[in-house]
Structure formats: C-alpha cells, structure tokens
Image: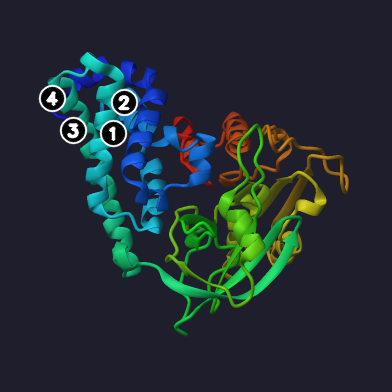
C-alpha cells in the first residue's frame, strides 16, 4: 500500500510521467545497456531494435502507480504473467536494485527540475512496492521448481527435429544428464539460452507444444520475419538454421500461467500463427485427462502451408467428445472457412462458437488478441475469464 504522504504526489505527477513514458523508457534502456553491456544477454536484441521492449517497464510502473491510487485497473494478472517470465529468465533480486537506480535516473533526466526530492521519493516507493511484489512471487516460483535463479538452467540435447510447416520447426529436447524431463502444466513455456555466432548469448521463451508426461520437452519455433523496417528475429532464424539433432543448449524449468483452470467449464482456445503451440499442449492434455470437456479450437493463419500442428490438433480433438474447430486463412478461402486478417487482428468473433460459461485462452500477435478480446467482451464473456500469453515484451497492460 502506498504511504499516505506519497499518495497525493503520485496523483499529481502520474499524468506527467505517463505523457513522457517513451522518453523515459528510451533514456532508461540506453543508459542501462550502455553502461552494463553484459545485460544484453538478458534483454532481447530484436525487441530492443524494434522498440517494443522499451516501453514495457516504464509502462508497468506507471500502470502500477495508477492502480495504487485507485485510478487504474488491478494488475494482478500482469504481475503473475511477468513474474513467471522473470523466473524463466533466472532474474535475481539484486537486479531490481540496478534497474531501479537507472529508472529513477531516467525519470530525473527527462523531467528535470519537476523531480523534486519529494517527487523522487514517491516514485521510488512505487517502484520498490512493485519490485518487492515481483521478488516475492518469483521466489515462490523458484521454490516450486526446486531451483535457484543462478542455477536454474539444465543442458538439453536435440533428439528430434521435425519440419512442421513453412519456416516452422519442432525440436524435441532431452536432458543431457539422463534424468527425467521436468513435469509441466499444459500451456507453459521454457527459456532457451542461445549462443550466437558473434559470441553473444540471448534468452528466448518458447511454449511447450506437447502434452505433459513425456520423457522429453518439445518446442515449435517459427522464423520471425521483420516487417515495417524491423529486423528479422535473431534467435528464431539461428535455431532453424543451426539447431540439429545432437545440438546442445541450456534450458530453463517450465514456467507460465496460461494453463486451464480445473473444472468442467467449456474452453475456447484461440490462436494465430505460432500462438498455436500452447493450445496444442492444452488440447493434448485435455484429450488425455478430460475427454468429456467441451472445447472449441479456433486458429487464424496466413495460409494453409504456414499452419503448424494442424493434424496433431485434429487427432487430439477426435478424442474429445465436444470438440469443434474453426480455421481461418488470410490468403483466400480454404475448406469453406472465411478469411481472416491475422496481421491486423481482425477476427470474425461473431462467428466463433461460444458455449455458455466458456473460459477463453488466447495466444498470437497482440493486435490479433486485442481484436478477439474486444469481440468476446462484446459477446458477454467476463474479462476475468479471458487469459492470454504474450510472446515478447508484455506491453498490453491497458487491456487487462
């Protein structure tokens, strides 16, 4: 809870901070990474180059400040999602001290004399309330997995490689030490530590694309092609070109909260592109554990040749009594289904079968998910029954 002395300061200054988020974010990342180049191993080079990562932290702090003074929506869902992501990266408590120092420096540099000692103290309290919440949640996640953040990665070997669709490949990963692969919940992901040819290391999360219970883990990777001047995905291209049977790399324990809630309520699984990967895990799990549960799977793709895991989804669905599937392709109608513009997120939500009391799970490009979520809300689905996973920087807080 924000102290009573600082609450009026935050109320007065929150609009000013919000109006300068882009400048604060750019100054923060430029100074942090410029003076601490080793942190490039934690932050995505591609997301930094594209600009989408820069706004995430400052936006989260500003949003949290608004929620503290009752001027913004609750952020519990965002905290849960980001804490899982941090745990998958092995973030350590002391790193919050470094981030806080550079963030407050950026606020002072951008806003200048407006940042009095009183204002600085108020925003420092906001940051540390948020940081301590994350630290506590992440400590519990590490404890659940039985790992420490400094030693959470294990070495895995690629035991199988399968071409799934155009520029999309599945990799089966087996622990090098011969021990069993960790248990995971359907819809979770792992982080890969990828050593690049230039000597740098990058961390990337990939959803586990099979049901829990096997001796190995499987991820499905699509090559990311840059658009609108953004670069191609650095890690996805490297994995597809250079990761083969016998290749080894460190992998984190599974984390993530896009997991089905217990019960018998119908499930609506909506994905676009490679966002189908957690849905394949969820559907495979349901086929094994709850074949009587009603499930509607909806997938949007640019074309049939780009559609990964489709046969597998149909095989899972054939074992579920109340299964329905809809597929939309962007480039021309196929098999009698309507077109969908995946890139713009225009989805005909009015045509999605919507069972009573359905819980919706979304994964795909952010514009796509925004469009789907808006349509589901219009059709009466409660916001707390719509869950989603974001690939990359989590800058969708305004829709929580």
Q: Nearer the viewer, mark 3 or mark 1?
A: 1
Q: Which mark is residue 103?
A: 1
- Give x and y (percent) for residue 20: 37, 20
- Pointer 4 residue: 4
Residue 141 versus residue 390 in the image, above or below: below
Q: Quadrant of the N terminus?
A: top left
Q: CA distance from mark 2 to mark 1?
A: 18 Å
- Pointer 2 residue: 66
Viewer-proximal residue, 187 or 29? 29
Residue 83 versus residue 379 in the image, above or below: below
Q: Residue at x 76, y 44 (%)?
A: 302
Q: Nearer the viewer, mark 2 or mark 1?
A: 1
The crowding category of the residue bearing disc 4, from other C-alpha atoms within 10 Å (few below 14, some 14 to 19, many at least 20), is few
Number of numbered discs on residues: 4
- Pointer 3 residue: 125
> Which sits earlier in the primary sequence, circle 3 or circle 2?
2
- Residue 273 visible? The answer is yes
Q: CA distance from mark 4 to mark 2?
A: 15 Å
Q: Quadrant of the C terminus?
A: top left
> Which sits earlier in the primary sequence, circle 4 or circle 3?
4
Residues tagged 4 and 3 counted as in contact (Cβ below 8 A): no
Q: CA distance from mark 3 to mark 1?
A: 13 Å
Q: Looking at this rendering, what residue extends furthest in the front direction?
A: 198
User: Judging from the image, what secondary structure is the residue with disc 2 in?
Assistant: helix
Q: Nearer the viewer, mark 4 or mark 1?
A: 1
> Which sits earlier in the primary sequence, circle 4 or circle 2?
4
Residue 225 versus residue 30 in the image, above or below: below
């Amino acid at each position: 809870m924000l102290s009573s002395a600082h609450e009026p300061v935050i109320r007065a200054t929150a609009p000013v901070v919000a109006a300068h988020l882009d400048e604060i974010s750019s100054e923060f990342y430029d100074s942090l990474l410029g003076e601490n180049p080793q942190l490039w191993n934690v932050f995505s080079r591609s997301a930094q180059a594209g600009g989408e990562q820069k706004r995430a932290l400052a936006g989260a702090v500003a949003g949290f400040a608004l929620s503290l003074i009752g001027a913004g929506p609750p952020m519990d869902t965002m905290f849960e999602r980001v804490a899982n992501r941090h745990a998958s990266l092995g973030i350590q408590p002391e790193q919050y001290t470094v981030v806080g120092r550079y963030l407050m420096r950026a606020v002072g540099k951008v806003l200048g004399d407006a940042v009095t000692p009183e204002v600085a103290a108020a925003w420092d309290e906001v940051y540390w309330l948020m940081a301590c919440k994350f630290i506590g949640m992440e400590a519990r996640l590490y404890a659940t997995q039985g790992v420490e953040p400094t030693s959470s990665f294990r070495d895995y070997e690629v035991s199988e490689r399968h071409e799934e669709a155009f520029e999309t490949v599945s990799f089966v990963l087996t622990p090098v030490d011969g021990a069993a692969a960790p248990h995971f919940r359907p819809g979770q992901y792992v982080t890969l530590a990828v050593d690049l040819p230039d000597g740098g290391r990058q961390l990337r999360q990939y959803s586990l694309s099979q049901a829990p219970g096997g001796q190995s883990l499987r991820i499905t990777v699509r090559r990311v092609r840059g658009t609108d001047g953004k670069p191609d995905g650095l890690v996805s291209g490297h994995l597809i070109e250079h990761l083969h049977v016998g290749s080894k790399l460190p992998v984190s324990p599974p984390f993530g909260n896009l997991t089905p809630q217990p019960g018998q309520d119908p499930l609506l699984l909506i994905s676009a592109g490679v966002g189908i990967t957690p849905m394949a895990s969820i559907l495979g799990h349901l086929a094994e554990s709850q074949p009587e549960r009603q499930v509607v799977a909806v997938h949007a793709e640019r074309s049939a040749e780009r559609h990964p895991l489709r046969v597998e989804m149909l095989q899972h669905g054939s074992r579920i009594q109340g299964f329905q599937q809809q597929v939309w392709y962007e480039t021309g109608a196929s098999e009698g289904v309507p077109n969908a513009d995946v890139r713009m997120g225009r989805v005909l939500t009015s045509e999605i079968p919507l069972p009573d009391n359905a819980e919706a799970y979304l994964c795909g490009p952010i514009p796509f998910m925004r469009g789907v979520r808006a349509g589901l809300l219009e059709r009466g689905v409660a916001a707390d029954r719509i869950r989603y996973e974001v690939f990359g920087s989590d800058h969708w807080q305004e829709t929580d």
